[in-house]
Amino acid sequence: MDITFNTNPKLNILIPVFYLAWQDDTLSKNEFNALNAFIKNQNWFTKAEKDFLKSKIDYASPPTRSELFHWKEKIDKALDSGKNSTNLTELGILMANAERPALNEDDIKKIGVSFAEMESDLGIMSREVISGLRKQRDTITDKYKTVESFDVKKLTAFLDGTQSAVINKVKALISSQEFALNIPTDTMEYREKVLDWSKILAQHGLGSYAYPKEHGGKGDIEGYFSIMETLSYHDLSLVIKFGVQFGLWGMSILSLGTEKHYKKYLKDIASLKLPGGFAMTETHHGSNVKGARTTAIYNHKNRTFTINTPEKYDRKEYIGNTANHGEMVTVFAKLVIDDKDYGVNAFVVPIRDSDKNTLQGVTIEDCGHKMGLNGVDNGILTFKNVVIPYENMLDRFARVNENGEFESPIPSDNRRFFTMLGTLVGGRIGIPRSALAAAKTGLTTAIKYGDKRRQFGPEGGQEVPILNYRMHQLRLMPYLANAYAIHFGLQYLTKRFVNRTEDEMQEIEALAAGMKSYSTWNTRDTLQECREACGGKGYLSENRIDDLKNDTEIYTTFEGDNTVLMQLTAKNRLGEFRKQFGEMNVSTIFSYVVDKAKTSITEKNPIATRNTDDSHLKDKTFQLQAFHYREKEIVSSAARRFKRLIDDGLEAFDAVNVMHPHMIQIADSFLDRVFLEQFQAQLELVTDEGLKEVLERLYNLFALNKLEQHKAWYLEQGYMEGIKTKAIRKMVSQLCWEIRQDAVPLVDAFNIPDSCLGAIVTNKAAEA
Amino acid sequence: MDITFNTNPKLNILIPVFYLAWQDDTLSKNEFNALNAFIKNQNWFTKAEKDFLKSKIDYASPPTRSELFHWKEKIDKALDSGKNSTNLTELGILMANAERPALNEDDIKKIGVSFAEMESDLGIMSREVISGLRKQRDTITDKYKTVESFDVKKLTAFLDGTQSAVINKVKALISSQEFALNIPTDTMEYREKVLDWSKILAQHGLGSYAYPKEHGGKGDIEGYFSIMETLSYHDLSLVIKFGVQFGLWGMSILSLGTEKHYKKYLKDIASLKLPGGFAMTETHHGSNVKGARTTAIYNHKNRTFTINTPEKYDRKEYIGNTANHGEMVTVFAKLVIDDKDYGVNAFVVPIRDSDKNTLQGVTIEDCGHKMGLNGVDNGILTFKNVVIPYENMLDRFARVNENGEFESPIPSDNRRFFTMLGTLVGGRIGIPRSALAAAKTGLTTAIKYGDKRRQFGPEGGQEVPILNYRMHQLRLMPYLANAYAIHFGLQYLTKRFVNRTEDEMQEIEALAAGMKSYSTWNTRDTLQECREACGGKGYLSENRIDDLKNDTEIYTTFEGDNTVLMQLTAKNRLGEFRKQFGEMNVSTIFSYVVDKAKTSITEKNPIATRNTDDSHLKDKTFQLQAFHYREKEIVSSAARRFKRLIDDGLEAFDAVNVMHPHMIQIADSFLDRVFLEQFQAQLELVTDEGLKEVLERLYNLFALNKLEQHKAWYLEQGYMEGIKTKAIRKMVSQLCWEIRQDAVPLVDAFNIPDSCLGAIVTNKAAEA
């Protein structure tokens, strides 16, 4: 009689291993040989039995597909028998004894050890394999899902705060039919559409929010920023067009001009009757705008100014709202009186008449197709002997008096220029807020997609929403936490700006420069992750991530290159530090030293550097101390290092160059600390328990994720040990897992109009 | 007589401080007050003198602009006098004594101390300020520039190696007039242009390079990859169209079909007479393609197959070359015989006739506008009872025999499917090589721009090329080093693939999956940095970074989502590790333990962990050991952790989920090590001294930058101490500084056709 698994049931003991060998690719050719050798050594098999078994694992002659199926059926039956097995041998024994006891206790004892050894020699992780063979399994990953643990409407109200009326007004507008997001692929059509949209916004009085009441505005600067941010859920070309017309162009009049200019221009700017631009950047002078070379020569005879572009690369470039629509621009040019250069000042220069004919002496070129924002008509302006009247000088900070002499309350050209720039800091508040809105839209898309999209799953089980995967959570949840942190931080910046005093200006400028960089870089990274997290769907234009990404791409460059702005922030921080140090007398220096010593004792002792308690890691005081420590250490080590470089005889310019990367760290650590503080401050204001709990989780993720990102620095400093940084990483992962349940309601709280979200989010029925 | 600086020359001592106070914004209002108080206490001034001095620093009444100018003239004169001053007081004394000795040695001794104290109290960093006041200064940053220290042509030859003939052939073609890069904005026109370009490539025999000679090809798979890579300097839609037609479509026939299919299709595919596609991905099954739900039901009666799309989201989506042009596609569908499912197999299915009419039962939709690659016509395919003949099953790995029974040399459906996929691994070599070319183009643009673009500079000096700034170097040089490392690594992968044996397949698949992710993510990051490094110019389409970026954006998703591919690589590594461990007997385990102990002794002793010698940090053995250490530790800790999770009773699927981030680390550390080894291997082959030196520098930057990126891990492990990681950071910065001089020739060595580079690079005359 032929030998089979049915006639010789004890042979069934090897079926699980055989199945594994053929079904998966766990075993190598060598291991097939090892298995063969093992069988040869089993003396309780007859020669014929051995030959039969070996024929089943002949690498050159696999079993048939149906035989494999048959083995699996037997395995399933054994697994369903209710008896447990912790390795393949135990499972095999169950199968051998399935019909009648083919192996008794003694046999089992005898062979159990060698089989278990064989399993382990083959590197089989038995429990895992058994678990993989089981048909239906309950897994945690499988069952995890969205739970709405708090009142979404309450959170929206908390986020919007006092601004909810204007926010809802804008949301209603951009949700209306006339704002339907059908972006024309033709650039010229797109620009006209954006202009039309801008006019509608102007009609609704949204353009003049920031202007004084006496000039037809609302005097509500905070409202203006809320409009910018809320509009940014919609098309970003519209936002930039809006920002150029009502922000840059209008605010340059308001900030650099005087009453006569307000009267003459503001109303028409607000209504968009007078479209205009802001002509500061030149081809060869972008970051270094102080080096602008356009000239405004004063003519004593008729009290006019003549505007000139000396050479090709002194043209005003990238000027928004000018390639097609602008009729007037604020030009930054060096004022020259009697061949003497009085530094860069601002002038209103007409470039087109109201019939859109380009004026004499002005040449307007089109910047052409861009990576994004193609609904904005960026132009290049050249001026050749363009004469403008005396009144067109924006004369808040400098003027030419009746004797043709230069006059200014600020004697230094340098300082005057930066004072002028300082009044325009609003752009560095509007842009990061616009960037934040784009990040929120991306997150809403990616998180809702991740909650619906299923891929892979436990064998025999349903496929799992990809947002249940730890890796996917780690990719998105920290950015969700960032969005909340930056939301609160930018609200703080806005309030500081709106309620500013003269003395605070430099600090607020530094804060705005830094937050602009922080927020726009965060948006860049958020949208990148969102694109990838949505896979192929993220690449389709219908889902909007492409436009959000490409439009905000330039946010890291315009309104000041981020790297340069971070230097500016750092310089301010270093200055603050120097002053603080400079003002110290013996007693304050003493207390500073004591302070430092205290840090060492309380924070750098082994108990603190190795403390991995959950309650410690989530302790707000610990977190703030750690952020503060990093900030202070980096700024003071920078000061020491800079002094050393200078003392070593390096030219200041070279020393500054060496310090650049260190300077970025100064700004970054300062900003981290401010965002942390503001998040903490907001938590204090929450009364609703549900909200508090979920916001605390987001807050902790923000705080610990930052510590995790900078752990190399903390380890280098000996402020933490490896055991602690590892505990932080683990907690970050755990927080991501917890927040995933609330992720969908957390993006719902942004309350982004459906009309602004991509097809994969809004076509709920279609995708479900 | 009125008191002036001229009448009372000793008062000049304060001019430098006054100038500083008004010119820059170093001093605060408080500090103006402090200065006032200081003057008040100087008893060697008369009351009238004090009043005069105080009037010059009245915060409410600044000096005139011309007075400020006058002060500066005096300062300049003193600085030019040839006498040194190390602080503002010394400078002031020089000025006081300029005409005649107004202050004698005794005076100076008396007042020097209090003045120096005042300077320090104000936080003035004297040397820096003096250096800032000087008119003309020699700085290192200022004078630094491009130096060609090696023979560029020799480096190009080294990079191209045996492939230079085919590379130059492709470069000549894409530089020709008919390949001029005027990308139509209209999508349909763009697609036709790309098709036309593809036909020209086919005419030149470039489509069939990889096909066997007996079927009209060249049997040159390495050449095929060189073509893909070189074409990628040109438009990337062309590359993908080319890859879909000749790679995916053609190679699916070659890899999954048999002789009869080769005869029937290959010639027409190579000539583009038969455009086709590769229909694997379904809307709901992308990463998890094994879950594909399209069916191919076998009909016994007439030996045909009926192809069906069961439900809407089982449609084949994103299928390249199908929305407009494809006439036939390879469809992956579950083979069903007599209601039994035999797993996913491949079938050739016609979708259009040669007049481009869609065939009955087939529905083709257009994927619509995408973020990039709009020259590729991606479609969505639905099949409704589409009957195909028996021969259309690609039957290399499975067939239906004459009795209508399923037959396959690979019994497991799972294993068969992955064997089929394995033969298609070529796509995971072509894509990372294409990505690399795009990164090279971006780097060429950004580095050449950085070398020309000047912004800021020492006071009174010329503006400085931005590539001289340390921060700018840190942004770009590491990516330049990566480009070289990845170049060598992908050449290695290609050679391994071309010369593979059956046994190596799994390893090569894992390597390709990992390198595909590594290279495409690196390209994503490189192009992002290049865009920002080019500022506004990087945003203009004429400079091509936008297209390169948007086109390669999907590279991280298609041919396998990077995150999923990294898991695949990691799984293979973990498997290797397990086998290695599994095969160990007592003696090998003992030697493993000894090995580990040795690591501890030689690498983890305080001398090694704190060694900051240049020669040590640049030592190839140290670097390789460090990379190896990370790789081994991560994989073995993962194995331990996974076992612990399973032993703790976690379901395998849940445990795998928890392990995902750890798995990414396994793959990443493995890839880092392979790239490092291959870079080292290439250095061995260089004989030319000039080349060797510059490549050694790039190699060191690659190696040390990776150690710097992973320093947190090394610190956590105690493998390095803070002093060492800080030394590494410093050396990375130094290497960037050194490589900057060679950066332009290093990108010139890529030898990218001028016609493929953006306007800011090629309009040399215009920008200079």
Image: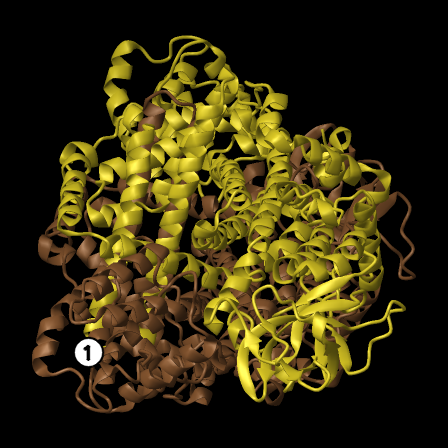
Chain colours: A yellow, B brown
The answer to whether A81 is drawn above or below residue B292 in the figure is above
The answer to whether B615 is drawn above or below residue B33 in the figure is below
Residue in the foreground of this view, choosing between A501 and B350? A501
Residue at the image point whose x is 14% and y is 47% from the top: A587
Residue highlighted by disc 1: B90
Residue B607: image quadrant is: bottom left
- State how many labels appear: 1
Residue B608: image quadrant is: bottom left
Circle 1 SS class: helix
Q: Position of residue B54 (x, y in %)?
A: 31, 66
Q: Position of residue B513 (x, y in %)?
A: 49, 53
Residue in the foreground of this view, choosing between A331 and A375? A331
Q: Position of residue B101 (x, y in %)?
A: 17, 88
Residue in the foreground of this view, choosing between B182 and B132? B132
The answer to whether B78 is drawn above or below residue A566 in the figure is below
Residue at the image point whose x is 78% and y is 61% from the top: A275
